[in-house]
Amino acid sequence: MKPTTRKNLFIALTYSVTLIGGMFLGYKFLKDQGFNFQRDLQFADNSSEKVDEIINLINRNYVDEIDADTLSHLQIDSLLHRLDPHSVYLPPVKASEQIDRLDGNFAGIGIDYYLLNDTLLVTHVFKDGPAAMAGLKLGDKILKIDTLNVSGKHLLRSQMIGRIKGKKGTSVQLVILHSGASHPVSLSVKRDRVVVSSIDASYMINADAGYIRISQFGANTDQDFVESVKALKTEGMKKLILDLRDNGGGYLTAATGLANQILPENKLIVYTEGKHEPRTDYVATGGGEFEEGKLVVLINENSASASEILAGAVQDLDRGVIIGRRSFGKGLVQEQFPFGDGSALNLTIARYYTPLGRSIQKSYKRGYTAYQNEIEQRFNDGELTADPVVAKDSVNKNEAFVTGSGKKVFAGGGIQPDIYVKMDTIGVNKFYSTLVEKKVLFDFVLDVLANRYTETYLEQNLANFAISDTDYKDFVRYILAKNILIDNKQLMASKQVVYNDLKALLYKYYMGDEGYYKAMNLNDNMIKQALSSLQ
C-alpha cells in the first residue's frame, strides 16, 4: 500500500473522480514559486538544435555550476534528469496546456460532475455560475452534451470533459434530467469565468479558534485568506489553525501575501538566490489581518514549495507552532523557456531560503527515480508511522539553525514540525484500499446515502451524526453487487474507517469541501493536537 493517510486517500479520490465541468477552478495546477515565462523568446525548431539550445540555456541560467560537456550526448529527458527533478522538457501540447492553466485561460459552466453507473451526475453547482443561472442543481443527471448521448455510454472521462469545457462566450447544449423529475429538459448554457475561493474550508472549530484549509496558493489566496479571517473574527476568533496539509504550492506572491497577514513588519519571509540570479528578499510589510493571536500551522509529507515557505517563515520567526510531519522538501525556482515548435523548457534557476537561511530542498543526489520514491521510502523507514518518542528523522543530521527563542531547526529535506503527529493507518488495509481504488465508497454515498439524508438534517447533526447499522449492512450488499470479493477479517478491521469516510463523503456531497473537512476534523489527530497546543 502506498504511504498515504486515510484523509489523503479520500482527497485523492474525490478530486480524481470528480470531473471538473469545464470550468476554471483556480486550477489545481498553478505556478510554482517564482515561476516565470520568457514569452518573447523563440528558440530552436528541430531536435538537434533544441538540445544545443537547452545546454546553452543551462549554461546561462541554471542554479548551480554545470559541466556542459557531460550533457551534450544525452537525450533531453536524461539530460534534464542529470540536473534536478524539477527541470523538465514539455512537448508542445503539454506546454500549451500548462500555459493555459497557469494563465487561467479556461472557462466553463461551473459544475463538478461524477460518472455514476454510466450516467453523469452533477455533484456541485457553483453559486452564481453559468450552470446555476441556467437552472442546474445538485443531483441532476446529464443525458446529452450537444449531439453526444452520454447516458449509458462507456465513454472516457477525458471525452466528457472535452465536451463541456470550452472558450468563454461559447455555449453548450445539455439535456438534463432534474432530480425527482420524470422527463428531461434541454438547456443552453453559455460558458464563462467562474470565481471560486481558493480557501477549501473556513469555520470556527470551537468558541475562540478558527480553522482555515488551503490546498493550493492561487492568484487570490492571500485576499481570500483576509476575507476568511475577517469573517471568523466577527464570530469571535482569537486563535487560528492554518491547515496546509497536501498543499503542493502555487504562486509566490500568494504565499508572501499571506505571510504579510500573519508576520510583523520588516520581517524577512523568504529569499531566493542562484548562480545567475542575485539574491531577492521578500519582506513583510506589516498591518496584517492576523499579526497577533496564537497560530498553529499543519503540514505533512505532501506540503510542498509555497506551503513550506510559509511554514518555514512561521517557524524561523517563532510566530507559531508547526504540527504534523516533515514536509516534502521542494525549494527550487523554475523559469519557462519556449521553443519555436511550441514546446518549452522549465529550468531551475534559483533556490529558496527561509529567514534563517535554511534551504528546504531535499537531496536528489541518488537520482531521479529515488527522488520520486522518497516519500514512500519515508513510510518504509517508519518515519511517517512511528510513535513520537521513537520517530527518526534524517533532517536531524543536517545543519542546525537557532531561532530567536533558542529552538533548533534544520536545513534540507523540508520543514520538520515542532510537534510530530504520526500517520493514522488504523484500519487502512488492503481491502479498504481496494474499496477506495474502485470508488465503491463514493458510489455508495451518491447512489444510496444521498437519497436517505437531507442537507438540513446533516447540518443540524454534524457532531452526532453516524452511519447507521442499516446503512452499513446495505453497504456490504453494495460491495457484493460490485462483484468484489469480501475479506471479512479486513472489512471488520476497517469498519470504523469506513464509517468515518462515508460520513465525510456524504457531507462533501451536500456541503462541499467545507462539509468534508468539518466531518473529517472531528476525528483528526492533528486537529486534536492543534487544539491542545492553542489552549
Image: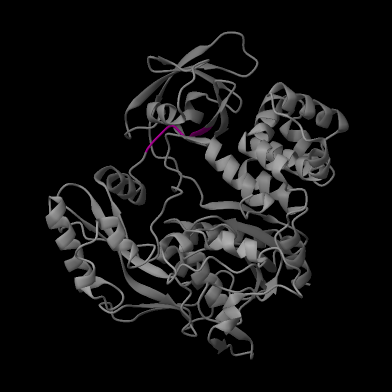
Residue 397 appears in which quarter of the rendering?
bottom right
Q: From where the camera sits, is residue 58 visible?
A: yes
User: Going by the picture, which residue comes out furthest to the right?
Assistant: 469
Above or below, comparing residue 533 to residue 219 in the picture: below
Q: Nearer the viewer, residue 353 or 440?
A: 440
Above or below, comparing residue 509 to residue 99 in the picture: above
User: Is the C terminus in the top left, top right, bottom left or bottom right quadrant?
Assistant: bottom right
Left or right of 403: which side holds 79?
left
Q: Nearer the viewer, residue 318 or 491?
A: 491
Q: Residue at x 71, y 63 (%)?
A: 385
Above or below, comparing residue 334 to residue 105 in the picture: below
Left or right of 342: which side holds 130?
right
Residue 116, percent across and down? 59, 25
Q: From where the camera sits, is residue 317 visible?
A: no
Please say which color scheme the image uses.
one colour
Q: Residue at x 28, y 45 (%)?
A: 96
* Labels in figure, total: 0
Q: Nearer the viewer, residue 423 or 458?
A: 423
- Region of the chain picked out in magenta, as a range: 107-112
Residue 413, percent across and down? 52, 73
Judge whether residue 520 is colored magenta: no
